Amino acid sequence: MKNIKQIPEPQYHFATYTVGFVICLILLFFGSNISGQTIISGRVSGEGNNDGSGISVLAMPSLNSKEILTYSISDNSGQYKLSYTSSSDSVFIAFKSLNFKDTIVGLSNQSQKFDIKLLPDVFEIKEVSVRGNPISVRGDTINYVVNAFAKAGDRSVGDVISRMPGFEVTELGQIYYQGKPIQKYYIEGMDLLEKRYALANKNLPHKSVSSVEVLQNHQPVKMLEDKMASDETSINIKLKNDVAVTGTMYAGAGFSPMLHDINLTPMLFNKKQQIIATWQSNNIGEDLNTQHQPLVFSNGELQGYKNRKPELLGILQLSKPQIDKECYLDNDANLVSYNHLLKIKNGTELKINSSFYHDKTNEEGKVETSYFLDSDTVTFSEITQNKHFNKSLSTDLKITQNEKKRYLTNKFSINKFWDSEEGLIRNQGELVQKAETPHFSLANDFDILLPVKRNFVRLYSFVDYNNSPQHLSFSPGVFEDVLNNGQSYGQTMQNFIERNLVTHNFIQFTLSRKPWIFETEPGIRFEHQELETSIEKDQNLLLADSLGNNLNWNYTELYLSENIRFEKSKLKLSLKLPFNFQNYNIRDKIHTSSGEIHKLLFTPSVNLKYDLNGFWILRAGAKYNQQMGEVSSLTQGYVFSSYRQLKRGIDQLSEKNGMRYNLKVEFKNPISGFFSTLGWSVSYTTNNLLLKQQVNERGLLFYDVVEKDNRSNLQNLSFAINQYLSNWQATVDFKANYSRNKKEYLLNNQLGWLRNKVYAFHPGISVNRWKKVDLEYSYALQIIDQTSQQADISVVDQKHSGSIFYTPEKRHLFGLSGEYYSTKQSGQHNSNVLFANFSYHLKPSKGKLKYKLEIRNIFNHSEMVRYYNSDISLVRSNYSIRPRQFLVTVSLGL
Amino acid sequence: MSIMRYIYVLLLFFSSAITFAQDYVPIDTAIFSCSYFYDFQEDSLEKSSVQSEEMTLLIGSHCSLFLGTNELYRDSILLAHSNEPFDQNYLQRIAPLMQGTTIHRYCRYHIYNSYLADSILFTTYLNSRNLKVKENNKINWEIEANQDTVILGYKCLKASTELWGRKYISWFTLDVPISCGPYKFSGLPGLIIQISDTEKQHCFTINKVKDIKGKQQAIYYLNEDYAEITAKDYAKSLQYYFTDLYNRVSSGGFVTFQDEESRARSLNRLKSRNNYIEKY
């Protein structure tokens, strides 16, 4: 007791403080403390029957410190002993227990004996009960309980997934987990839709789904499980019932004009087969193409084959406003699709995915383009009305055998597009533009994996035939100075025909000597291409060499890629060393051409992933890139890319060289629902060719290519944080992004630098806490600063969006959602728009029918203003949006 | 009676934990009840072999009991019927109630932790014998300063230790100043909310905390004739149990299977149970 001046009777203090804990601060200064071991021991006693055993005694360096120097649990007779090392003058001792008040005392940091008598208290435990924690972890699988995240207005499982912490769903329906696109979308372990998973995600009712499983480091090829680690994430939809007949069925009608919205999507899932069929038809602005087109992104990069349609020609498009597509898309769309997966024995699956899409869309707007020339600014204004007719059929037949001992897959695809479009442009006069852009493709994709002792051999072969005869016409005729000696004339027609056969074959040998894996891949890519372009004037072919192209080429690429991987439980390192020998054999029937080009490219890359403790993951990578340009850019004759643009290339392939570095840190704690990522990337590119742009005072553009080494660089910093608050049943998220790029450009023979900086912030919250009210709010801010020789421009876009759903009782649901956009361009007027939609849902207690009434665009706004910049121009675009509309929908609920 | 015996033996055979007419001795009254999800990898090499079992921790004022939630349920049924005559009807009444209360072999135990005696008593039934293990409950924890998180609304601090051949990371809370936790883990100045080995092969995560002072839930001790062994020996005999079972199944004298495939699968499953929480 010698170190303590005064020990007041604790009771005295306890009586005066009604707060849960008491601080008696008794500090004595015996000069500076020697930093050695301090031992504090003593006895804790209580009143009456409660003895002082089992009490947690903690030593802390300061009052509110998280740090604990040491602790002790008092024994049978209440004795405790703390021994620690600390250099500070004082130390705080906390006594915590079930039967006594929490007590904290401050003592000088000296070895001493300290007894205390505690006052009794009743401990109230904070009860919690999670009916299955909404997010739980089992090994590499994270399980999200769908009910916990579903809101009153949700229909499909996709609506719910977009709200789960860690997830993001883009407008195209692509799902991201922790900032990375998912690899597979399984339903009960089966991959029915592959890259068309948006169809299920948008139509599978969330009420049929019990949970969404996130499969981290998932290896879809069973043969490679446990042998080859995967860094990809897939998700699996767990249904409530093993055998389920479910789906979506609704029909809606409204005005004005006459609106309809029909969706009939029956689904069947059982152990042996899965079927999803659909017929959808609407003119209310819901884009059905996202359920028809396969997503071809994987790993954040465009992957897979070029099965989609190339857009060789097209009418001048309006730039879409940055608002919800439903607000402006003036469509008349139909989608019919049938998807069937059948499991036959030995782990073999047969699959057919067939989809037909038909759409008519209209767009209307006013575009004002200002070109910044040296002396002055040239501004053009035009009113555009476009009609697009899209029709396409896509069918895939696939057989897969995915077993422990064998992996085999073969996929045959047919894609046909019958697309056309038509536009009317009014500036000083009127101009009609028409384009026909059909495309046909046949492809076969074969992949087999065979075990050879402990290793593997993989054989891969891909063959694709494409044919696209495309046409674009303008009437009256354009570029009369160049094409008709300054005389006006009737019609200009651009023809563009491309045909090709593309194959890619390789053998891959995998040698696994844990922790090392060596993959050797010799392969060959071969392409035979034919490209023909010509320009017609009033149906007469123009024979000038400068206006046509006729190119044939064979491209052969022999490559050897060595991939060395080192995989330990926490560290994954991969080094890719690909050597490419590229050989072009080009025949230009009109222009002189270089004929043969040979090139050896070496593009090594290294990637690292380090999993610190399951919470922290660090990724880093570096890549040297060397890339040859497309042969199709060797068109030395002019081609119309729009009625104001003529474009041609030169007899030289562009060559890009560059470095890219990236670094990403992820932190996640699924138990507490916390997810975050911080990423940085930078890339430097040099290109030997530069686009030369020439604008004349009439706003006509000539694009040529000149030989000049030029550089560009891009830096990007992004941050995302996502927290699920279990007390509030709320998901809070915040995203920020900063990017900077710099590149050279050549306009009217003047060389300049273009610098762009983009800042974006995006916080949001979604609350599910109350029984009757669901809330959601998000804000997005984007600032673009652009500097060039001609002008400095800054654009600030802001968007507030919120929604509230109110359920006074089970049968009724009221929803109000609003979006407020504000865009500001330096030196221009502010443009603000408030959109609001109202909905009322009724579900009578009897029967299975549900009713919904919607009023969209309550304030009846008719257009959106948007500013955007290309390197040489500033564009202000007014886009017509859908007027106020009323819609009643009847759906058959589950 | 001979038929009865037969059924009794059968039941014992399939579920060795069911023993009837047991002698339950109340030793404490539970104040709090916590429930944990125990996710564990059966096969140390197979990441997908994760099994899950819900476990219960009953906290009394002098001791705690940790056991499978299904086991607690079974105990309460047997206790409720313990005064009834042990006849054929008894079995008929009990058996349906027991349905669906299977417990993974890795989780079949009662673990009593006495705060006063600083000791842990582990009891189980294996290879036709009642076994007990007595151990000291002292664990050398290292509290990691400035590492905190919030789990289920509890502010948690991080502590780590190394036990039975694995490294563990635990998150405990000072909000509940009870030196308790799942399995044999205790000795921190607060309740363990989550604990997992660094390989994530054995994870306990709390999912429910309830105040049950008013419920009069007794903590029972099952009074049997236990043979005392060491924890290490228990881990060994568990391994022996699976090997023995494997041999019996593979020799075909134990169970007959519909076809070769299901036999192989079942053998594989037995073989893959190689990853008990305690490995020495």
Image (cartoon, grey):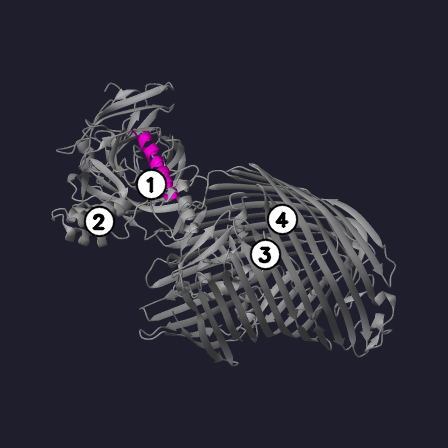
Indicate the quadrant containing the C terminus of chain B: top left, top right, bottom left or bottom right: top left
Q: Residues within 10 Å of mark 1 (few under 14, many from 20)?
A: some
Q: Is residue A681 above or below residue A529?
A: above
The kind of secondary structure element at disc 3 is strand
Question: In this figure, which residue is indicated by the disc labeled 1?
Answer: B106
Identify which amino acid the numbered label 4 is placed on. Answer: Arg
The residue lying toward the viewer, choosing from A723 and A794, is A723
The kind of secondary structure element at disc 1 is helix
Identify which amino acid the numbered label 2 is placed on. Answer: Ile
Magenta span has A423? Answer: no
Which segment did they paint magenta? B230-250
The residue lying toward the viewer, choosing from A199 and A396, is A396
Question: In this figure, which residue is indicated by the disc labeled 3?
Answer: A409
Q: Can residue A477 be seen in this snapshot?
A: no
Q: CA distance from mark 3 to mark 1?
A: 40 Å
| Image coordinates for residue A809, horizontal then vertical, percent | 31, 69
Left or right: residue A153 compared with residue A658: left
